[in-house]
Image: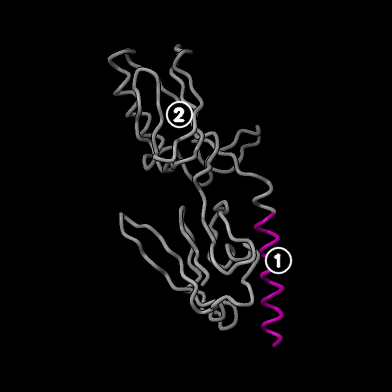
């Protein structure tokens, strides 16, 4: 009984921390790390060669000495953007460095030796979903190394009718749908933390 009470208090603390992180917002760009001292937002824990662009991200693209080729645009749900002289181009699933190289190749016939700058001004694609018998189902920003328990806390915790041992994480991996089981009591009471996996972009936590 005492352990259950302590676990509930711990979950409340986790939930308050997570909501605080969300309320602070998370703007990012392509150079890596957290927000810099000059207020410029940076991609968390990712350089331009590692961060993968996703649908909803806001990109700033400019070509040196070509003001007409400067654009701030949002990646469409299908992963595409439209850029002058290039037309539609798929950017979701590519890194910032790959996008720069792709744009350089496509612009070279029109602009000799183009010097292109690409920044992710805001990450909107780092989202996870919590659905089912949860108090506040919906989508939530994927903050840091968020795990299943933290996501459940952000979603307000389980309802009284939730099937605590039937929770699962649904994840798309290389065109395959994978399911990872999560037993709430096994993790919070029995301290079986193996099931409390770190979430990834696009994961869906299902609470039956």
The image quarter containing residue 6 is: bottom right
Magenta residue span = 1-19
Q: Where residue 199 appears, x then y in whole percent?
A: 48, 60
Residue at 59%, 66% (x, y): give it. Answer: 152
Residue at 39%, 19% (x, y): give it. Answer: 84
Residue at 71%, 80% (x, y): give it. Answer: 5
Q: Residues within 10 Å of mark 2 (few under 14, many from 20)?
A: many
Residue at 39%, 39% (x, y): give it. Answer: 79
Vertical relation: 33 (above or below) 137: above
The image quarter containing residue 177 is: bottom left
The secondary structure making up most of the magenta span is helix
Disc 1 secondary structure class: helix
Q: Where residue 41 appears, x then y in whole percent?
A: 59, 36
What's the mark number on residue 73? none
Does the magenta segment cover residue 24?
A: no
Disc 2 secondary structure class: strand
The type of colouring in the image is one colour
Vertical relation: 94 (above or below) 137: above
The residue carrying mark 1 is: 13
Which image quarter is the N terminus in? bottom right
The residue carrying mark 2 is: 118
């Amino acid at each position: 009984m005492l352990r259950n009470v302590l676990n509930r208090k711990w979950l409340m603390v986790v939930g308050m921390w997570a909501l605080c992180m969300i309320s602070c917002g998370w703007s990012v760009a392509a150079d890596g790390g957290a927000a810099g001292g000059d207020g410029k937002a940076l991609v968390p824990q990712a350089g331009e060669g590692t961060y993968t662009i996703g649908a909803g991200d806001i990109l700033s693209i400019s070509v040196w000495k070509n003001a007409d080729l400067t654009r701030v645009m949002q990646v469409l749900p299908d992963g595409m953007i439209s850029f002058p002289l290039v037309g539609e181009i798929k950017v979701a699933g590519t890194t910032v460095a790959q996008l720069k190289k792709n744009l350089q190749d496509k612009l070279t016939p029109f602009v000799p030796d183009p010097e292109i700058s690409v920044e992710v001004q805001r990450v909107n694609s780092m989202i996870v979903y919590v659905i089912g018998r949860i108090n506040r189902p919906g989508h939530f920003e994927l903050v840091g190394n968020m795990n299943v328990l933290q996501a459940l806390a952000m979603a307000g915790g389980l309802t009284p009718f939730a099937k605590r041992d039937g929770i699962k994480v649904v994840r798309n991996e290389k065109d395959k749908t994978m399911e990872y089981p999560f037993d709430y009591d096994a993790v919070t009471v029995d301290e079986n933390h193996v099931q409390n996996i770190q979430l990834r972009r696009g994961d869906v936590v299902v609470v039956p």
